[in-house]
Image: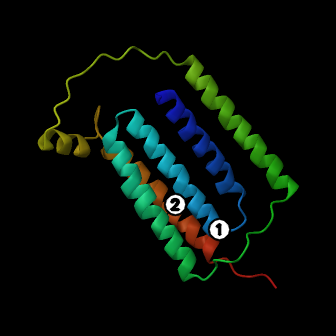
Amino acid sequence: MEQIVFYILSSMILIFSVLTVTSRKILRAAVYLLFVLLGSAGLFFMLNFYFLAAVQLTVYAGGIIVLIIFSIMLTSMVNDKLESVGIKKRIFSFIAVAAGAVICILTILNTKFPPVSEIENDGSVRNIGLRLLSTGENGYALPFEVISILLLAAMVGAIIIARREKVN
């Protein structure tokens, strides 16, 4: 049963990812992105990473998508279509995607993954707080800072796209 759910979530993520980047209507692209983020949260739940799943749902699916949709609605660009992509951009995009896929596949194949033993995890509030503030091993402060920069860049990009001037 887990494999069936995994394949459903994986296909959902792949299909909606492609729809997100190929949709010419920006509001639809934001909704498709919401489904991608929900599918990712589902994978985190399957892996028993409940904290990451909760963060995925609240921060990304809940907060960021709502902000993107509000910025689209506030700029009244709901029915506008994005410009069609030229052949030059398609070729460079394909090359970038292929290079990224090759790098990811080679990295995964060349990495030695040591077996993981069950580690007793102290789930106390104090331990979670110390890990959230730590920048060392098993700390979460640095990843949260990197994610905050990524979210800021995503919001600026969404506002720029939504505020784009009409060409007459």
Q: Nearer the viewer, residue 142 or 101?
A: 101
**Residue at (63%, 77%) from the top-left corner?**
78
Q: Is residue 61 above or below residue 80?
A: above
Q: Is residue 12 above or below residue 101?
A: below
Question: What amino acid is at disc 2?
Answer: Ala
Q: Is residue 65 above or below residue 108?
A: below
Residue at the front extreme, as displayed: 1
**Residue at (73%, 69%) from the top-left corner?**
82
**Residue at (12%, 42%) from the top-left corner?**
126
- Identify residue for label 2: 153
Question: What amino acid is at disc 1?
Answer: Ile
When asked about the image quadrant of residue 167, the answer is bottom right
- Identify residue for label 1: 26
Residue 113 percent across, percent down from the top left: 45, 17
Neighbour tally class for label 1: few under 14, some 14-19, many 20 plus, Cα within 10 Å? many
Q: Nearer the viewer, residue 1 or 129?
A: 1
Q: Is residue 106 above or below residue 14?
A: above
Question: Dot 2 lies on which element?
Answer: helix
